[in-house]
Structure formats: structure tokens, C-alpha cells
Image (cartoon, grey):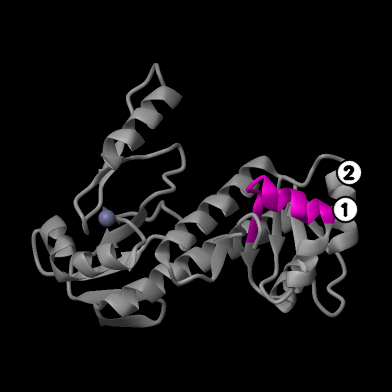
Amino acid sequence: MSMQTTIKTERERRPHGAFRTRTCVGCGQRVALAARGVDLVRLVLGTGGEVSVDGRRGAPGRGAHVHPRRACLEKACSRGLARAAKGRVDRLARAGGSEPLAPDALVREVRAALDARVEALLVAAARAGHLALGADEVVAAAARGEARSVVVACDAPAELGLPDVRRAVDEGRAVAWGTRAKLARLGARGVGDPGDGVGVLAISSTSIAAAVRDAARVADACGVISVNVVERGA
Ligand SMILES: [Zn+2]
């Protein structure tokens, strides 16, 4: 039933074109991809029985898709990936080597890939001058209508009291990610003064802001959260 709902929504959104679907190798559900493919995580199947997580969704190689949920990742490990690969899949490839494929390890890699994706997006935004770092700059960006998404450091909950941050939370434009120190390092590479940490930033690029929110939603679904959408009332 939820599959039909998903597809109907997609059809309504793109009435003149065909919509693409992907099948989760865990539960077998067909999912209509939105433009960015926010619902499934792409895995890449290697030739030697290895699988890796395609955090940026563009890595070459034969792909398989899976819901970033514990249950689907477990089923993918036990048989879904082998079925998709038409052969054994028993190693998880990651930076610096590989290890036996197991649900815990796959969950950890999915989380790490999403974390890296968010960081790469924020670095790109900083280099392009699309980041407002710190409360003062965020308020100024919001006044100019340029705070498309707001990122609050996980160790800076006090920033949620800022009216512009509050509004972003209410409108589903806020994401919790990283730490004050991590956000400050973005500034060191791009704009702003790191100081003793940055508790909040705003992204003025519409496309980067949307991509960061997508990654956060997928991470939310994963249930092992290092990136998450801040819910109203949180
Ligand atoms: Zn699934």
C-alpha cells in the first residue's frame, strides 16, 4: 500500500514523464525515486564479492539499492545482495581495506558515507561563498532571505532558541550535524572566523541546502543518527 502511495505521489509530481523506480535488495519493495533519490541508499557491487556504500550516488560499477533501515540492511547482508550480484557478496569494502560483511558494519558504513556527504556539501558551499557561519551571520542571511537550510551543531542546542533557527525548524529546513569544532573547521577552509567553535550555520545555495536535507533524511531513516532533521518541538 505504501508503495502505491509513493508511486502515485511521484506520478503527480511528474505528470508528463516516466518515473524511475528502484528495488530495495532488503525488503524487495519498489520505490519511485524522487529527483534526488532520497529514499534509498546506493551500494556498489564489486567483482570479487565486495560491496561498498556509494555515499555520493555516482560511483561507477554495478549498483544495488537498499532502504537505510536496520531490517533491510540485515536482509541485504543475508541474501539480498547475493541475489542482486548473482554470486556471493561477503566483504565490505571501505577506505583502507575491507572486512567481513555484517549488518553492524554495513550500518556503520552507511552512516559514515552520509556523514562524509554532508561534510563534502558544506565544504563546497563554503568554497563557493554560500555559508553563513555563526549566529550573527545566520541572522543576517535570514534577513536577506538567504538562509535556505540551517545546520545546528549537535553540541550547540542553545542555538535552537534563535528565532531564525526556530523558524527553520518549524519549516523543516533545519538539520543537526557535527560539532561546534567541526562547523568551525568548515570556516577555516572557506569563510568566517572559526573562533572557539561555530554552533549554527546557514546555507544560501538552494541546491546544496536541499542536498544536505536529503542526506539528513536518509540518515534519520537509518536509525543510527549522526545527521538528522530537527523536528518541530525538538
Ligand atoms: Zn527495504
The residue beneath circle 2 is: 143
The one nearer the camera, 207 or 224, is 224
The residue depicted at 73 percent of the width and 78 percent of the height is 181
The residue beneath circle 1 is: 139
The residue depicted at 23 percent of the width and 47 percent of the height is 29
Visible residue check, residue 41 = yes
Above-or-below relation of 90 to 52? below
Q: With 231 as the anchor, is 129 left or right in this view?
A: right
The one nearer the camera, 75 or 203, is 75
Q: Locate ligand 1 by image quadrant.
A: bottom left
On the image, the x and y values in percent for residue 148 come to 71, 45
- Quadrant containing the N terminus is top left
Furthest residue in direction front, as rendered: 233
- Determine contact: label 2, label 1, CB under 8 Å: yes
Amino acid type at circle 1 is Val
On the image, the x and y values in percent for residue 203 come to 72, 51
Furthest residue in direction left, as rendered: 87
